[in-house]
Amino acid sequence: MASPKILIVEDSRSFRNILKHLLKAVDAVITEAANGKSGLKKAQAEEFDLIISDVDMPVMNGLDMCRALKDDMKTRSIPVILLSSMEKEVDVDKGFEVGASAYLGKSTAEKYLMQTIDDVLHRSVFNRDRTILVVDDSKTILKLVESGLSKSGFQVVSALNGKIALDLLKNMKPDLIISDLDMPVMDGFEFRNRIIEKQKLAKIPFIVMSANSDRASMRNMVEKGAAAYLVKPFNLEQLVILTEKLLSNQFQLLLKDRQRLVSERKAMLGSITALAHALEARDPYTRGHSENVSRFVEYIAEVMIDSKEEIQALRIGAGLHDIGKIGIPDSLLLKNGQLTKTEKKIFEQHPVIGSNILQPIPSLKQIIPIVLYHHERFDGLGYPGKLKGKEIPIWARITAVADTYDALTTDRPYRKGFPKEVALQIIREIRGTQLCPECVDALLETMK
Ligand SMILES: [Fe+2]
């Protein structure tokens, strides 16, 4: 996730400083407010990913601020973490009542805050990406349900009957469907029947909300796979909690998946990095080269790419760009002097060999284009794919520039490395032929 924008609302300056100190770990962009009123104003004026607020404050307390945030269309989906020295159960209840995503006691803040922030931010990104289709012939109910769900950050699409909903489903795949039963044109039973027929839609969790409470209808809908049946009038909170619960099973699965990927990636990177070091140990002239290329790639990427995650992945990929050289025989890799035509052909296999090494590792898929295409040229005369211009993935084009720059400035057995200015001049001369112009410009800017 890019640096989250966090608003801290807290009347005690010293506690604000403690929070700022703790938040350094998530690399957040922080704005401060000293009471609820000023917090509310700032949240309405600017966009935030998260608000962390005290409860007991002068002018406007945290509960009133939270309530006001949740009543405003513009700010209702920003998650709020309440932090308070009032840690009794009734206080916590009050916090959730006004729509807070989490409530922490100040005494435990240091221990739990980071984990809570991580959970809340991921949940909020998750909710923001979930779309819920609500079907009801009453506009009042549609409005009510829509407002309740969007307070939790969900995207809501609504339809006045089953037929309109089916039409919408031709072009969208919601994560959850909530539907009334008694509706004109096409009622909820028929709507459900039509959904079950379509494999693509049948698995979407389906909630029935109906004034119809006879057992036969309920059984009928449950048999048709409805995940829940709410009898009107129901409490809106109930619906929101049910929605979050149904989707959070899915969320928990995603979260586990993410954690598994992260640890798998770490383990794999460990062994791959060891491989890269083995390669460098074999060939003294590439020693340090991968590390340098990684560093230059990062400089260039910081000019061209906003996402920190992408830059990090790119950095990892650049560090492994020559991993395929592990499959090139010593007689070639360490040869002093020109390679013959046949030898050159073999040497030019290293991007393909490298990509084959990484292929079986799912979490490294993203960086394969760097390894495979770092010797493509912008004018289409490179190898192995002879890709041209923007056909070459941007990460590979960036790596090519960094690779070339480091090769020029490093000492070789047959020549000394060029000084920075000379190397940059050579790079300027091959801008647009060998190297991507945009990436060269980024290098020049960062080397100024
Ligand atoms: Fe290479």
Image: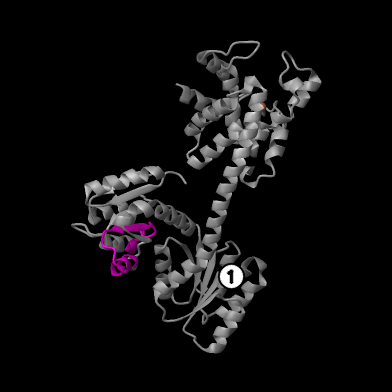
Q: Is residue 330 left or right of residue 419?
A: right
Which residue is identified by label 1?
A: 166
Say whether residue 70 is visible. Answer: yes
Q: Is residue 151 left or right of residue 301?
A: left
Q: Quadrant of residue 417?
A: top right
- Please tell me whether mark 1 sits on a helix, a strand or a loop: helix
In this rendered view, identify the residue nearer to me: 175 or 420.
420
Tell me where residue 234 appears, x and y as whole percent.
Answer: 42, 79
* Residue at x 51%, y 80% (from the top left corner): 183
How was the colour assigned to the protein in this rendering?
one colour
* Residue at x 57%, y 62% (from the top left corner): 172
In magenta segment, residue 328? no
- Amino acid residing under circle 1: Leu
Residue 312 vertical placement versus 161 (above, below): above
Residue found at the very far top of the displayed protein:
415
In this rendered view, identify the residue nearer to me: 60 or 289.
289
What span is colored magenta in the figure? 70-96
In this rendered view, identify the residue nearer to me: 289 or 373.
289
Residue 216 vertical placement versus 436 (above, below): below
Tell me where residue 245 appears, x and y as whole percent.
Answer: 48, 68
Q: Quadrant of ligand 1?
A: top right
Tag count in the figure?
A: 1
In this rendered view, identify the residue nearer to me: 46 or 13.
13
Tell me where residue 239 appears, x and y as whole percent.
Answer: 44, 73
Q: Is residue 284 left or right of residue 106?
A: right
Looking at mark 1, is its residue's CB closer than 8 Å to ligand 1? no
Tell me where residue 295 appears, x and y as whole percent.
Answer: 52, 28
In magenta segment, residue 83? yes
Q: Quadrant of residue 70?
A: bottom left
